[in-house]
């Protein structure tokens, strides 16, 4: 069930969910690079101090320690801001995790322009592209805290975002894109905090007689090829929506897949050709055109090209 009654930052899911899973018997450890209060990982450390390994401001070391613990059979989580992981430690992720296939769960919070007032240096707009370039990673971008709780290895966000799902009525499945709204004229495919913006755009379009399907593309790898193919075949037009550069992330995945299987008119909503800046979350979404109005405008354009 879709609902928008409350708001909660997805980052708040990490620590409490790890505590719950560890209590249930999973052999979890967590490595932290001095940002545990921001990512909520410290809550796990407070409950299980012998399973919590703070390494200080040393993200590359965090990955190495996590890989070592995973190689010993532990379920190793590590967390930091996305500009630091994968930003500071791509080589360590590639050599110690991706290539050997160690069981490391990287939780990268504070991605995209929603980092807001901290400015461009803190706004990770390449994080998905970096992780997706390594083919052995499963990559998940949750739309709200409920989905984050169910896919806790995902990136988390600092701002409070509308809760889209009813806690008891939704189950995350790796490789499945949830259809949040039916429609036959155009499909809006969004991930992360912009799923709500896509839903709002669909509501705007419905007032004009345009029926927009909305897909939550939370599983970026593996991709839901069946849902994507059906969207192209049944609606004939696609708009992708992401708080990331349009190359290397959701737009790239959708474009590459449909180029092989079923090309249709497309529009890509995301960041292009420039980095972010400082401002409130709402100001930056408006400034960079990551709004329901911009999504609706793009949808009208692709529908006209059908």
Image (cartoon, rainbow, N blue to C red):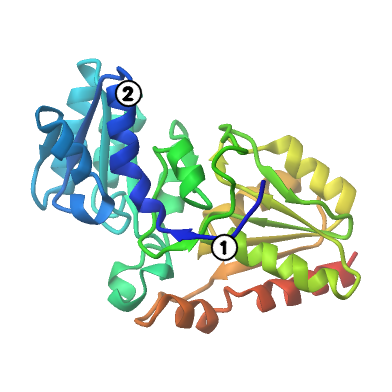
Q: Is residue 169 above or below residue 306?
A: above
Q: Is residue 243 rendered to the left or right of residue 267?
A: left
Q: Is residue 14 above or below residue 246?
A: above
Residue behind mark 2: 100
In the image, 16 versus 58, the foreground residue is 16
How many other residues sit within 10 Å of disc 1, few (<14), some (14-19) or many (≥20)?
many
Question: Which residue is depicted at the point 51% across and 84% down?
Answer: 287
Question: Which residue is depicted at the point 51% across and 60% down?
Answer: 6
Viewer can see residue 219: yes
Question: Which residue is depicted at the point 28% across and 42% down?
Answer: 15
How many other residues sit within 10 Å of disc 2, few (<14), some (14-19) or many (≥20)?
few
Q: Is residue 207 rendered to the left or right of residue 244?
A: right
SS state under label 1: helix
Residue behind mark 1: 194
Find residue 111 and report its horizontal and vertical position in percent.
Answer: 39, 60
In the image, 284 versus 68, the foreground residue is 284
Find residue 39 and report its horizontal and vertical position in percent.
Answer: 27, 51
């Amino acid at each position: 069930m879709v609902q928008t009654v409350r708001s909660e930052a997805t980052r708040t899911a990490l620590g409490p969910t790890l505590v719950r899973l560890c209590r249930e018997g999973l052999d979890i450890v967590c490595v932290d690079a001095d940002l545990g209060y921001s990512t909520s990982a410290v809550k796990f450390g407070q409950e299980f101090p012998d399973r919590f390994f703070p390494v200080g401001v040393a993200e590359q070391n965090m990955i190495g320690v996590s890989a070592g613990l995973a190689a010993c059979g532990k379920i190793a989580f590590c967390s930091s801001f996305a500009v630091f992981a994968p930003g500071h430690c791509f080589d360590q992720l590639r050599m110690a995790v991706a290539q050997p296939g160690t069981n490391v769960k990287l939780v990268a919070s504070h991605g995209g322009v929603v980092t807001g007032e901290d400015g461009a240096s803190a706004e990770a707009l390449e994080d998905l592209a970096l992780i997706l370039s390594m083919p052995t990673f499963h990559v998940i971008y949750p739309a709200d805290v409920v989905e984050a709780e169910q896919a806790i290895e995902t990136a988390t966000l600092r701002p409070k975002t509308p809760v889209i799902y009813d806690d008891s009525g939704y189950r995350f499945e790796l490789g499945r894109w949830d259809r949040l709204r039916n429609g036959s004229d155009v499909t809006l495919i969004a991930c992360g905090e912009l799923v709500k913006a896509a839903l709002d755009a669909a509501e705007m379009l419905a007032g004009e007689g345009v029926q927009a399907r909305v897909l939550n593309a939370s599983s970026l790898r593996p991709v839901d090829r069946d849902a994507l193919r059906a969207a192209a075949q049944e609606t004939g037009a696609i708009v992708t929506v992401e708080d990331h550069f349009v190359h290397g992330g959701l737009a790239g995945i959708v474009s590459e897949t449909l180029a092989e299987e079923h090309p249709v008119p497309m529009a890509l909503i995301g960041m292009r050709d420039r980095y972010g800046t400082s401002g409130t979350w709402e100001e930056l979404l408006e400034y960079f055109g990551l709004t329901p109005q911009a999504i609706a405008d793009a949808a009208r354009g692709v529908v006209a090209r059908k």
